[in-house]
Image: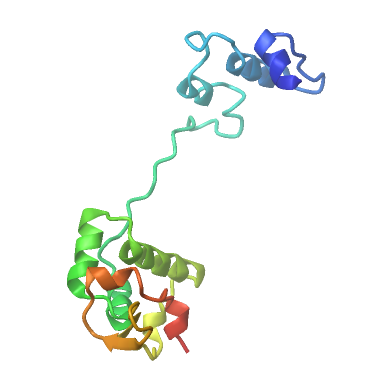
């Protein structure tokens, strides 16, 4: 119902909204997209900048990801990843399990107040466990081939920590 009223241009702004806030809402709810204000214009609006008198709002920029964290790479080596596949995933910005593991280790370190688990003693297995689909047998391998990747059990850093 609200959507229909907005599309018809027949809506009411609640009485408790300030006139500056009402102005921003009306500029957003213009039916013609070419006449609608841009996000940049909204970010420069007086009401949006209340409390930011010295600086105007600026668009959010993602922080650059650190792809050379030696502690995370060392943990991943101990988890069984090869240096080459780690380097390849990080340099190519691949979104695969290698990159996901690297990013999750970084997030875990942030949540622990910046302290890395590599500072403590870790008991990590250097072998990888894979399932042989044909006979259901389990085998260990220190190498990592692409055709086995799909059958590997998921590895988590917490599986290897004390």
Residue 50, horizontal then vertical, whole percent: 61, 30
Q: How many marks?
A: 0
How was this image coloured? Answer: rainbow
In the rendered structure, the answer to whether residue 17 lies left or right of residue 162 reads right
**Residue 29 seen in render:** yes
Residue at point 19%, 62% (across, down): 88
- The correct choice, above or below, for 62 with respect to 99 in the image is above
Displayed quadrant of residue 52: top right
Displayed quadrant of residue 160: bottom left
- Front residue of 130/136: it is 136
- Front residue of 128/37: it is 128
Residue placed furthest toward the front:
134
Residue at point 40%, 66% (across, down): 106
Please identify the quadrant where the N terminus is shown: top right
Residue at point 44%, 33% (across, down): 58
- The correct choice, above or below, for 16 with respect to 89 in the image is above
- Front residue of 124/143: it is 143
Residue 117, horizontal then vertical, whole percent: 41, 80
């Amino acid at each position: 119902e609200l959507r229909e009223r907005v599309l018809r241009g027949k809506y009411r702004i609640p009485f408790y909204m300030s006139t500056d806030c009402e102005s921003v809402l009306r500029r957003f709810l213009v039916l013609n997209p070419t006449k609608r204000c841009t996000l940049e214009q909204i970010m420069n609006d007086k009401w949006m900048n209340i409390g930011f008198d010295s600086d105007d709002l600026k668009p959010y920029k993602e922080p650059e990801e650190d792809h050379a964290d030696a502690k995370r790479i060392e943990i991943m080596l101990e988890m069984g990843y090869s240096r080459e596949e780690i380097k390849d995933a990080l340099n190519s910005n691949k979104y695969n399990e290698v990159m996901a593991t690297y990013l999750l280790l970084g997030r875990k370190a942030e949540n622990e107040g910046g302290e890395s688990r590599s500072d403590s003693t870790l008991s990590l297995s250097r072998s990888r466990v894979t399932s042989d689909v044909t006979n259901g047998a389990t085998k260990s391998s220190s190498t990592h081939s692409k055709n086995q990747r799909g059958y590997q059990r998921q590895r988590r850093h917490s599986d290897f920590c004390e």
